[in-house]
Image (spheres, rainbow, N blue to C red):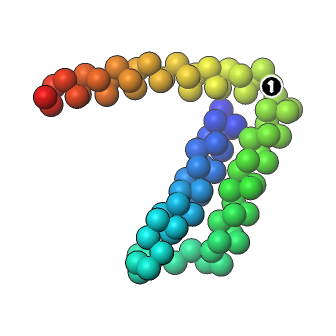
Amino acid sequence: MVSVDFIFFGLTGAALFVFRHRDPGREVPFKAPLHPFTTGLFVAACWITVIATVWNNPVNSVIGYAILAAGVPACLYWQRKNRTAAA
C-alpha cells in the first residue's frame, strides 16, 4: 500500500503546480516555502519512493494496485447512481 499511497501524495503535490499555473495573476491564498523547488523535490521523492517500493516488493505492490483497481468499478457505479438520482 505504500506505493499506492505515495502515488496520490505525489499527485497532490503536483496539483499545486497545476493550480499555480492555471491562474498566474491571482493572489495565492497560501505560501508554499521555496515553491517550486520544495514542491518539486517532494513530488520527485514520492515518485522515487513508488519506484523503489515496486522494485523491492513487486508482489506486495501488485496486491496494492489490485486493491486500488477493485475500487474503480464501485466508484463508477456510485457516480452513475448519483447522476440518475439527481436527474
Q: Which corner quadrant holds the C terminus?
A: top left
Across and down, in percent, residue 3 comes to: 70, 37
Three-letter amino acid code of the residue under disc 1: Pro
At mark 1, the secondary structure is: helix
Give the class, few, some or many, for how many residues have Cα within 10 Å of label 1's Cα (few <14, many ≥20).
few
- Residue 82 lies in quadrant: top left
**Residue labelled with disc 1:** 58
Position in image of residue 56 (x %, y %): 86, 32
Q: Quadrant of residue 78?
A: top left
Identity of the residue furthest to the left in this view: 87
Image quadrant where one finds the N terminus: top right
Residue 26 versus residue 18 in the image, above or below? below
Q: From this view, report whether residue 85 is shown above or below residue 45.
A: above
> Is 2 left or right of 70, judged from the image as shown?
right
Does the rendering let one see residue 57?
yes
| Residue appearing at x 25%, y 22% in the figure | 81
